[in-house]
Image (spheres, rainbow, N blue to C red):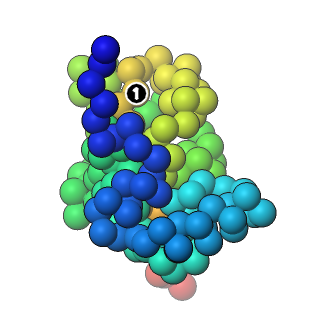
Amino acid sequence: MPRQTVTALPLGELLIAAGKLNARDLERALAAQSEMGGLLGRVLVRLGVVSEVDVARVLSQQLRIPLLLAEEFPLDFPTLEGLAVDFLLNNHALPIGLADGVLSIVMLVPQDPYLCRALHLATKLKVAPLLGLEADIEAGFKRYLQDLNPEADNDSDGE
């Protein structure tokens, strides 16, 4: 019989166990989630009962997917053929590394099997998903887009 680990618990229970959430707030969030839909972690953050970083840290443990914060993003992003920038933006998926046929990509929802499969099919690379915070990914995209088109900033400066 396989041994059960703490990561087998649902996100809400893990947040309670970590002391980041109480049972009453979890019940409230679950009710809101059933009415509005969406991922529990995002509902909890929207309700203001737990921080995005706390949810991400616990989710990282639960999924066994590393959390990558903005200060850990590379200075230069990899250039990839076959990946539409709009697709990456819409899916909050930021390529951050390419080595030995493995694409490291920080995502808001790294547990999405369809997104990982689509990235693999588009790039023909093995995909190593990492969990990231929404604001960090958005800030990273600003730099990513600047790397793709460095002349864009210069065009608006001169008149």
Question: Which of the 4 image quarters holds residue 150?
Answer: bottom left
Could you tell me if residue 25 is visible in this image? Answer: yes
Dot 1 lies on which element? Answer: strand
Quadrant in the picture for the C terminus: bottom right
Single out the residue that lies furthest toward the bottom.
159
* Front residue of this view, candidates 18 and 116: 18
Q: Residue 69: x percent and y percent?
A: 28, 60
**Above/below status of 40 relative to 153:** above
Could you tell me if residue 141 is visible in this image? Answer: no
Q: Residue 141: x percent and y percent?
A: 45, 59
Identify the residue at image location x=48%, y=77%.
Answer: 49
Identify the residue at image location x=59%, y=39%.
Answer: 84
**Above/below status of 14 relative to 42:** above
Q: How many marks?
A: 1
* Front residue of this view, candidates 39 and 25: 25
Residue at image mark 1: 127
How crowded is the residue under tag 1: few (<14 C-alpha within 10 Å), some, or many (20+)? many
Q: Residue 120: x percent and y percent?
A: 49, 23
Single out the residue that lies furthest toward the top.
1
Quadrant in the picture for the N terminus: top left
* Front residue of this view, candidates 42 and 101: 42
Identify the residue at image location x=43%, y=72%.
Answer: 22
Q: Residue 108: x percent and y percent?
A: 48, 52
Identify the residue at image location x=60%, y=30%.
Answer: 114
User: What amino acid type should be assigned to the residue bearing mark 1?
Assistant: Val
